[in-house]
Amino acid sequence: MPRWGRSWPPPCPARCAAALPDTHAWAWQLTEAGRTASAGLRRGTRPQRLAALLQDGPVDEDRLALEIDGWREAARGLLKRGLVERVAVPASAMAPAPQPGPEPNPEQAEAISTLRAARGFSPVLLEGVTGSGKTEVYLHAIAECLARGRQALVLVPEIGLTPQTLARFRARLGVPVHALHSGLADGERARVWAAAWRGEARVIVGTRSAVFTPLPEAGLIVVDEEHDGSYKQQDGIRYHARDFALVRGKALDVPVLLGSATPSLETLQATCACAAAPAMRARRPCASSTCASARCRPGWRRRPCRWSRPRSRTAARCWYSRTVAATPRCCCATTAAGARTARAAVPRCSPRQ
């Protein structure tokens, strides 16, 4: 296996020859003074809500961020008064109990069975309209990956989608879910990078830069909204995170799940929709010449290009309609008679029209 399939450039602290940071989780708990003084805090304020949340024991910072907005300012105020303290705990100790999810519908069950049958490197396109339940398919696939003792990498197009994805994944999977994107500080990114490199981070959710995360025990790569243009890096080292995820999946020999409601044309061209469900379908690469979707897939023939400038805009539009509309090949145009019929159906316009 190529070395670059497992190891990737670390964040700045690690590149500067600094020691890798600790990968434990940080939690907050009440001190003895805080347990007695929490009743005197003004009701409804953030410090009082934070103290009430810490009554049952240490709470990790990820859960505090989901429960209370602006909790850090309240925690700093209580810390100055000696009512709370920050402690380091193992990341596995802060994992919530997994919650059961809804029963998959027939289309989701078909997609899950397709992913379950994938062995080694196998790119799969999960095509479903918005609200069809693609995230539930992601969760089932990641849960099976975790059951095999492997790591999962989930790519999302925008940083704004990361918090809601993290909250849902943490509630369902019951394992610490790590975020990795450009909005984090260098120290936090280095901590997540080190946890993934050591195999401690089992699920990583991030934007396009997270595709470089080391995965020594890789089991699955998920690219949500694979058609999104934000996966393209336009400055610096230019790359496409979706295409690079496929390269990594092949190097690591793991399945790559591409999800989208409107897949890109290049992804549709490389996948097959045989026996697909109406609302959600899982496509896999198909090299069979007898496949119906392969025969009906639009193709384009090369034609001589006119480099002379048209005499008018109307002439340009008419020439474009003749050359482009006459080129698609489909099942109905496999014979010479069908091809002549398709070409005859194109309106022939004169430049004066």
Image (cartoon, helix red, strand yellow):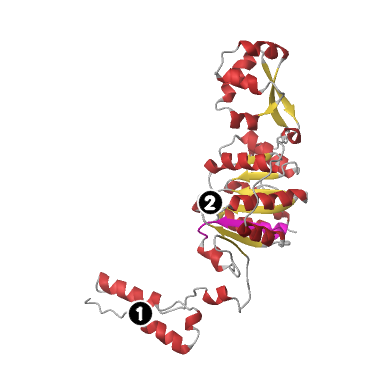
Q: Is residue 16 above or below residue 41?
A: below
Magenta residues (range): 249-263
Residue at the spot x=66%, y=14% of the render?
83
Q: Position of residue 344 (x, y in %)?
A: 36, 84
Assign a secondary structure to mark 2. loop
Q: Position of residue 152 (x, y in %)?
A: 69, 49
Q: In the picture, which quadrant includes the N terminus?
A: bottom right
Task: Give coordinates of residue 288: x percent, y percent.
Answer: 63, 76
Q: What is the C-alpha distance between the residues marked 1 and 2?
A: 39 Å
**Pointer 1: residues within 10 angstroms few (<14), some, or many (20+)?**
some
Q: Identity of the amino acid at label 1?
A: Val
x 32%, y 76%: residue: 319
In the image, residue 97 sits, relative to residue 224, either above or below, namely above
Q: Position of residue 7 (x, y in %)?
A: 71, 49
The foreground one among 291 and 200 is 291
Is 256 covered by the magenta stretch?
Answer: yes
Residue at screen point 62% across, 46% down: 210
Please tell me whether mark 1 sits on a helix, a strand or a loop: loop
Find residue 64 and report its image quarter: top right
Q: Can residue 211 be seen here?
A: no
Name the disc covering residue 346, or none: 1
Note whether 164 is above or below 69 in the view shown: below
Residue identified by numbered label 2: 131
Amino acid marked by disc 2: Gly
The relative height of residue 332 versus residue 81 in the rendered view (above or below) is below
Asked if residue 133 can be seen in this view, the reply is: yes
